[in-house]
Structures are given as structure tokens and as C-alpha cells.
Amino acid sequence: MAKQYKSLHPAKYYRDYLSHNIRPDGRDFDKFRPIILNVCSIDTADGSAIAKIGRTTVVCGIKAEFCKPKAETPREGFIVPNLELPPLCSPKFRPGPPSDQAQVLTQLIADIIENSECIDLKELCIFPDKLAWCLFIDFICLDFDGAVVDACVLSLMGALRTVRLPSVEYDPAIDNKLVNLEDRIPLHVRSNPISTTFIIFDDKIILADPTADEENLCSGIVTIVLNGDKLCCVHKPGGSALTEEELFDCVEKSKKRLPSIENLIEAALKNV
């Protein structure tokens, strides 16, 4: 009976639960779902990880390829992220070109990488104006159940920390490179940005770590990205407004979550 009620009146179904200060899955408003991180999941990638937040599951694979630096930035390499939201992960997505949501979230991930400065693009340069590394970072969502950006950023940090680039000797006189696949150097990851998503329900109730059902019914959504104690990025794509006090409260809740996420990443990397 509850399933039929939820299907016919989803908003009222949630309001009935929230009026008793609990969510349909039994969580408090500021309670986060369990998190799992597994690294080195893909043997054919230069770095990889799988992150699971609740049921939301994202695979991140990184492939390093040679490229020529841009003329305007001759001493920098490249990072190219891409998020796929296939029909496999949710009925809301259809086969074909990337959806608008996938493109928006891909750009958000690119902004997070840039703003957090977790990777110094200059360290990806092998020889100025001639040769550099390009890191293609592909995310594939296997199960879309809310807070997908949080899972993407978590899998990204796990995958980046497993990247080992081969040493390269380059002779510009003859445009020749010598790649030593046996001698690999760990990628220098300068920081660990952590993403936390909140939604606004009925313009007044703030819920942490939303499910897909909660995101579909929300009147607003905000993603807080922290780089240590530093606020790295706030993504608020319209919807209900947050007061300054409510925004600061979201930031504080995100900060309290940081130690557990950082410990999870370190535990996953322990045997790498």
C-alpha cells in the first residue's frame, strides 16, 4: 500500500515522513548514507576507483596519453573529465548524445578540479611547447540514486592517487621520446577536495546526502566542495534560496564529514 501511495502522491508521502523529523529511508535530516571506496578496479586504466554512496555507484577510470601543450600555456598539460549517465543507471536517462545534466555535471567536476588545484598542470608537462601528459578522466554512473557529484569526486580522488606515469626522456632535436614503462612515477596529488550535496524541500527543510527521489521533489539543491578547511566551490543551480545562516550550516556539516571521508580514502589506498 505504501508503494502505491508513494507513486500517486510522492510529495505528500515525503511530507508525512518529514513532519515527524525522519526521512522515508529512516535517516535524520543531516544523516549521511554509508560510503564504500575501492581503488585499482580497472586493470587497463592508469588509475581507477569505484565509489558507492548509498546505492549511487560511480566508476572512475583515468587514461594518460601524450599531447602537445597549447600555444598559450606551453608549460602545462591537460585534464579532460567526462561523465556518462547511461540508461543503465536510471530510467530518467535515454540512449543517445550526453544529456544536459551530464554536460552540466561534467563542467562542475572540471571546475572542482581547477578550483581545488589538486593537480598542478605544470607537472604534467614533459617538455615545454613540445610534449605533455593529457589525463582523460571518464566517469560512468552505474546506479543513479542522488548525490552523484559526491560519488564522482570521491572516485576521482581515489583514482588520481593510484595513477603511476612512466618516466619519459624527450629529445627535441629529433622529436623523439623514450618511454620507460618499468620506471613509473606516482602522480602528485596536492589536495583532496570533498563534495557534499544538500537539498531544500518545500523551501524550508534542508536534507543532507539526498536520494534520487528526494532530488526529484526538492525545490533547490546545493553542492558544497571543501579542500581541507577551505571552501573550494559552491554550486547552487537556481531553485529555493538559502539564507547566509543556512549556507554556513551546510558548510559546517560538510566539515564534520571530512575526517571520515579522508580516512576512507587513506584506508582504500593502504595496500596500493
Image: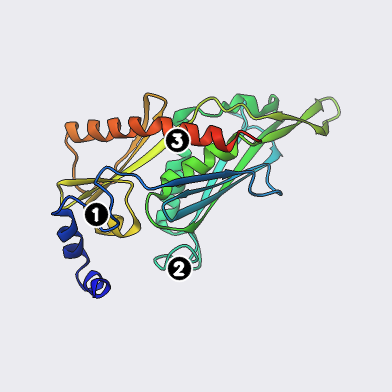
- Is 27 rendered above or below residue 7? above
Question: Counting other residues with Cα less than 10 Å from the Cα at mark 2, is it few (<14), some (14-19), or many (20 or more)?
Answer: few
Decide if residue 129 is on the left or right side of residue 21: right
Identity of the residue drawn at 48% across and 66% down: 87
Whichever of labels 2 and 3 marks the residue nearer the N terminus, that label is: 2
Q: CA distance from mark 1 to mark 3?
A: 23 Å
Residue type at numbered disc 1: Arg
The residue tagged 3 is 261
What amino acid is at disc 3?
A: Ile
Secondary structure under tag 2 reads loop
In the current view of this chain or complex, which residue is farthest to the right?
A: 174
- For disc 2, the marked residue is 94
Which dot marks residue 244? none
Residue 185 pos. (x, y %): 72, 28
Within 10 Å of the Cα at label 1, are there few (<14), some (14-19), or many (20+) other Cα atoms? some
- Quarter in which the N terminus is drawn: bottom left
Q: Nearer the viewer, residue 122 or 192?
A: 192
Q: Is residue 133 left or right of residue 194?
A: right
Q: Nearer the viewer, residue 19 or 80?
A: 19
- What is the quadrant of residue 55 in the picture? bottom left
Q: Secondary structure at mark 1?
A: loop
Residue drawn at (47%, 32%) of the image: 262
**Residue denoted by label 1:** 23
Horizontal and vertical percent for residue 36? 49, 46
98 to the left or right of 74: left
Instruction: Tell me: 178 left or right of 132.
Output: right
Secondary element under disc 3, as helix, strand or loop, is helix
Amino acid type assigned to the residue bearing label 2 in the image: Arg
Dots 1, 3 in contact, CB < 8 A: no
Image coordinates of residue 132 in percent, x first then y, are: 69, 32
Which quadrant holds the C terminus? top right
